[in-house]
Amino acid sequence: MTVRFQKLSEEHDAAITAALASPVVATPDPVPADIIIKPHAPHEPLPVGAVTRIEQSVPSGSTQNISNTLVADSELGGDTSPGPSEVLPENLSLIKGLDPISIMQLNDRGIIAFIQIAKLTDSEVTKIEKELDLPGCFNRYSWRYQAQQLHVEKNN
C-alpha cells in the first residue's frame, strides 16, 4: 500500500512541477465599456421607480442652511439644474473608483449624469450605498465631489 501511495505522490509532484514550469493562462477577450455600460437615452422610458430629479429637502423647523451642502448653487453656476427631460447621459466612468457594475446600477435608477450624483443628499447616498452594497464608497472615493468637478469642467 505504501509503495503505491509513494508512486502516486511522486506522479502528483511531477505533474505539479510540470504545470508550474509552463503555466497556461487563458485570458478572456476584452469587452468594450459601451457594451457593459449603456446609459439610458432621453427618449427611452426610465425603469419603474427610477430617480429622475433629486431635490434638496429641508424638514420643517430645521435650521440647516442649504448653502452649506456639498454642492453649493454658486459653484454650479446658479440654479441651472437641468429638468428631468434635459438630463443627457454622461460617461460616469470618468468618476474614479466607480466600477462598471455600479454605473449600470446607477443608470437603472435613472442616475445618468454628473449633476445627479453631485446633488445627492446624505440620506440618498446612504440609501443607494445600502441598496447597491457599496458601504462608504461615496465618501471614500469622493464621488459627489468628483461628479461636481466634472460637471463644472464640462460646462466651462
Image (cartoon, rainbow, N blue to C red):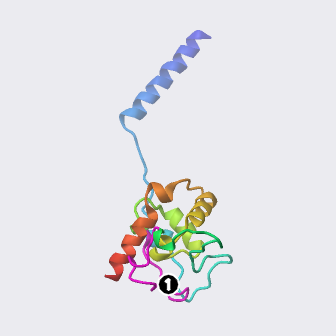
Image location (x, y in percent) of residue 108: 59, 72
Q: Residue at x 47, y 80 (%)?
A: 89
Residues drawn in magenta: 70-92
Q: Residue at x 62, y 11 (%)?
A: 1
Q: Is residue 49 above or below residue 17?
A: below
Kind of residue sitting beneath label 1: Val
Q: Secondary structure at mark 1?
A: loop
Q: Please, what is the dominant secondary structure of the magenta stretch?
A: loop
Q: In the depicted view, which residue is nearer to us: 30 or 47?
A: 47
Q: Which quadrant holds residue 43? A: bottom right
Q: Is residue 141 above or below residue 85?
A: above
Image location (x, y in percent) of residue 13: 46, 23
Image location (x, y in percent) of residue 105: 57, 67
* Residue identifier under label 1: 87
Q: Residue furthest left?
A: 156
Q: Is residue 118 above or below residue 156?
A: above
